[in-house]
Amino acid sequence: MRVEIFADVICPWCYIGKRRLSAAIGDHAEVVWRSFQLDPGASTVPGDTADVLMAQWWADRAAQRVAQIKAVGAGDGLELNLHTARPVNTFDAHRVLHLAAEHGLQDQTWERLLRGFHTDGENIADRDTLVRLAGLPEDEVHDVLNGDAYARAVEADQQRAVELGVNGVPSLVVGDGTPFSGVLPVDELRRLLLSL
């Protein structure tokens, strides 16, 4: 079975979804990570923290939403520090993730970037940070970041998301099926994947 997962590094639900997908399928499926930028126009310079931004989006519901995200993450063994995570542009991070795929290390690099951003408050738009977190040959990461390698691959993933009707992340697609949420409970996710 081949499962595509559309995700963005700055999305806490994608970190949760990654953990749940791993628990649901183990080694029984091929997972293909697809780039999906939540905010392609975002700056590479960190601004407000995620919890401050959520307060702007959700007003008086923000504290409850932030607490929910943190609690759900903790239930899956994740420390989600929305008070230190500062959303930034993820285009270069996605390009590095495509390089990781060439090395067969995309899953591991996703884990490092997700942890770096959500737990450790790293600026994953910073090139030195990407080189340090990637877990890949540093010269190759520098070459990618100093050129336009994998830019078309990121754009192609975004276009595929549009064609499939993906409008949020994390979204899973099996074969030519309809996208569905990647943050379902593990047992439900496992049942759903086995039924496809």
Image: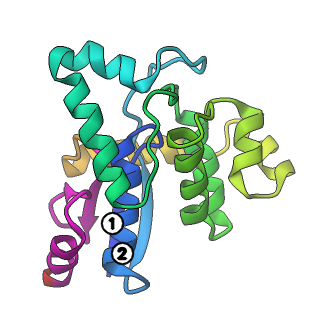
Task: Determine whether label 2 and label 1 are within 8 Å by CB.
Answer: yes
Taking the magenta stretch, the answer to whether it contains residue 179 is yes
The number of discs equals 2
Residue pointed to by mark 2: 23
Q: Residue 108's spot in the image, x, y percent?
A: 59, 64
Between 164 and 85, the one lying in front of the other is 85
Q: Say which residue appears at 20% left-offset and 71% top-offset.
A: 189
Q: Considering the numbered disc 2 on the image, is that residue within a helix, a strand or a loop?
A: helix
- Specify the segment rendered in magenta: 169-194
Residue pointed to by mark 1: 20
Q: CA distance from mark 2 to mark 1?
A: 5 Å
Looking at the rendering, which quadrant does residue 23 occupy?
bottom left
Give above or below for 96 relative to 182: above
Taking the image as shown, residue 137 lies to the left or right of residue 42, namely right
Q: Amino acid at mark 2?
A: Ala
Q: Say which residue appears at 86% left-offset and 49% top-offset.
A: 139
Looking at the rendering, which quadrant does residue 186 occupy?
bottom left
Q: Amino acid at mark 1?
A: Arg
Looking at the rendering, which quadrant does residue 103 occupy?
bottom right
Q: Considering the numbered disc 1 on the image, is that residue within a helix, a strand or a loop?
A: helix
Give above or below for 120 relative to 171: above
